[in-house]
Image (spheres, grey):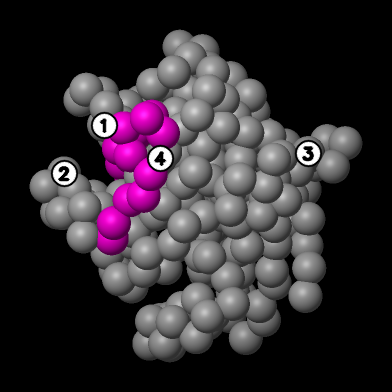
Amino acid sequence: MIVKKFLIAGGNSTALVYGCPNADKDKTSKKLLKDVEQVGFVSTKATLPKMTMMGGELCINATLAFASTLDKNGELTTSGLKNPIPYSNKNETTTIQIPFKFKKDDNVILLDGIGFILYDTKEKYEIKKSELSDLSKKYKLPAFGGIIYNKNKIIPYVYVAGVNSFVKETACGSGSVAFSIFSGIKEVVQPTEKIISIKMNTEFFDISAKVTSYE
């Protein structure tokens, strides 16, 4: 078993695990979550490069990390999305395209595989695990996040039901997409002060960020 670690937009430490038996994924996730914010499992046997997240959720930052390890451009598959998605790597920046599909319910944004609730800093200063757990159950999603925002900057929290994890994240791709839908802002500042860029058209969200590996 091989473990590779990455930072996306200067934060959101992510472990990608290669060659892990299905029976060991739960304990491997829990062990790695002591050091990283999220864990994805990579399959090398699939026709297309494939990643499955620790709770079967959609994780855009982990998908960016995975894409950064692949060719200059191509397609990959990831948990939370039914169909393959395009990716590209250029000038130390990785870009992925996910389908332009979401639902909006007041201050709640629902994507495939994860949802987010958003609050202005004037409304809320902290998000609790119990709130996100309840929302995950309500909307029947494997993961749910909370975003506290101030102008173009976000503070993201993510709960993953499958491993019962709750993390105040240092950067969040899917949260940036949800915030961009909610606010119209395209350059989303992370807690690291780095930027995740979101572009929307009628078919795709283009999400771009710098990915770096570390040990």
* Closer to viewer: mark 3 or mark 4: 4
Q: Earlier in the sequence, mark 3 or mark 1?
A: 3
Location of mark 1 (residue): 108
Instruction: Using the numbered discs, state the Cα–Cα distance from disc 3 to disc 4 in whole angstroms.
Output: 24 Å
Amino acid type at circle 3 is: Thr
Quarter that holds the C terminus: bottom right
- Measured from the top left, where is residue 194 in percent x and y? 71, 39
Q: Are marks 1 and 2 in contact (CB under 8 Å)?
A: yes
Q: Secondary structure at mark 3?
A: strand
Location of mark 4 (residue): 147
Magenta stretch in the rendered image: 113-129
Q: Are marks 4 and 2 in contact (CB under 8 Å)?
A: no
The structure residue drawn at horizontal position 37% and vertical position 64%, both measured from the top left corner, is 166
Instruction: Using the numbered discs, state the Cα–Cα distance from disc 4 to disc 2 in whole angstroms.
Output: 17 Å
Q: Earlier in the sequence, mark 3 or mark 4?
A: 3
Q: Secondary structure at mark 2?
A: helix
The quarter of the displayed image where residue 91 is located? top right
The reply to whether the magenta stretch includes residue 118 is yes
The structure residue drawn at horizontal position 19% and vertical position 48%, both measured from the top left corner, is 135
* Closer to viewer: mark 1 or mark 4: 4
Q: Are marks 1 and 4 in contact (CB under 8 Å)?
A: no
Amino acid type at circle 1 is: Val
Instruction: Using the numbered discs, state the Cα–Cα distance from disc 3 to disc 1 in whole angstroms.
Output: 29 Å
Q: Earlier in the sequence, mark 3 or mark 2?
A: 3
Amino acid type at circle 2 is: Tyr
Location of mark 2 (residue): 139
Location of mark 3 (residue): 93
Q: Earlier in the sequence, mark 1 or mark 4?
A: 1
Instruction: Using the numbered discs, state the Cα–Cα distance from disc 1 to disc 4 in whole angstroms.
Output: 10 Å
Amino acid type at circle 4 is: Ile
